[in-house]
Image: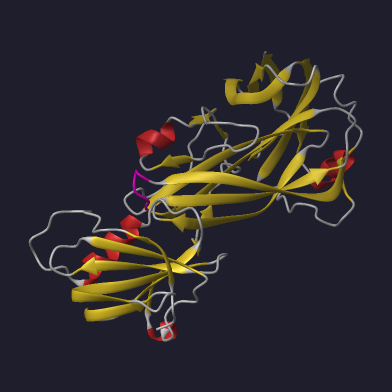
Amino acid sequence: MKKSILLLFLPFIFSSTLSAQIWQEHADQIVIEHLSKETNDFTLYAKDSTQTGFEITTSTGEILELNYTNWVYYVNFTDEIGGKYLIVKESNGNVLEVNTKNDWGPDDLEEWRIVVSYPIKIPFTEYSLSETLCLWNNYNYNLFSAPAVIINSEDELHNYISCAEGNYIEIDFSKNTLILAAVITQFRNPVDIGIITFTQSHENIYFFDIELLFYEDVGFYCTDRVTIAIVTEKMNNNSKVHTRRKYTNISTQLKNINFPYDGGLIMINSAEEFEEYFEYKAGNKPDIDFLKHTLLVAHGDRDLLKAVHNHQLIKQGENQYELYLEMVGSSQWLYSAWIVKLLTGKLSSETIISLNVKY
């Protein structure tokens, strides 16, 4: 055992009052819960059997001997030198924590069992409304650190979707959770979505990382927004998901749009029409199947505009729809342009869409 500098020696922390013997799986859970408030990434190691007389040698040469039967854990922090020991008393589940500094951990740490190592990359599938005439609405938004919405039931999902007609793809909420994030930006550049990742940082703490791809400077402070939804394995209702964003300039350029002064709505139904308005200089042109999709691009300008808060596609009649946009004010900028890009199910070239913007 390497020598450890003990910064703090705590008496037993009573995480529970138990009379039954603590088995390994229960001890693992006790320790994971004990670490639930840690903010740094770490790997948790465990001895695979109970220990009696386990010793920790201090920097002064004193030996701390635990003369009771216990489960022994070591926490190695990813970006720090040093870790700490967590000792779970087998008879009642009480936890003893010993913090260390400038310590590389036990000499035989490679032989210890890894209980958990954060962050954990969580698999997911993207969930899209782009082949329907449904749009996301009523979600949270924030300019900098938007909280994500955790949806665990059909009733909850129904609160965040409005359909002009038809329906959306069903989700098996007995096995899955849907995560919905709306990211608002306010720069001189519209954005597209790049790579997204979903990771678990600690128990019940998750991060939704979103890469936003900058367009070229449009010459005005421009409010843009993207909405991303993913489906993953079932999460409990105590979970929290934080969004983080990364910006990448790919030199996409808007063209043939008197942005933002004229305002209005453009309906794009083919690759040729798409190229009339979007130029991807870096070769990152999105692969849009215009046999299945229509791209709607609405834009305009407004003093003190903060964000596009809500939108709905409303059917008015045969091949007639209204795109309703709700704006929120109180921006730090006196003048702002805005743009909304929506990929929907295929609309006929004869379709007429009116734009209704509420400020």
In the rendered image, residue 190 lying in the magenta stretch gets the answer: no
Most common SS among magenta residues: loop
Query: Compared to 312, does 32 lie above or below?
Result: below
Residue in front for this viewpoint, 115 or 266? 115
Rendered location of residue 358, percent (x, y):
65, 13
Residue in front for this viewpoint, 192 or 53? 53
Query: Compared to 234, does 63 lie above or below?
Result: below
Rendered location of residue 121, percent (x, y):
51, 63
What's drawn in magenta, residue-wise? Answer: 234-238
Query: Compared to 91, does 234 lie above or below?
Result: above
Residue in front for this viewpoint, 54 or 215? 54
Residue in front for this viewpoint, 106 or 324? 106
Q: What residue appears at the point 32 percent right and 56 percent down from the top-left corner?
A: 34
Q: What residue appears at the point 11 percent right and 68 percent down from the top-left corner?
A: 21
Residue 94 sits in quarter: bottom left
Q: Is the C terminus in the top left, top right, bottom left or bottom right quadrant?
A: top right
Rendered location of residue 349, percent (x, y):
74, 33
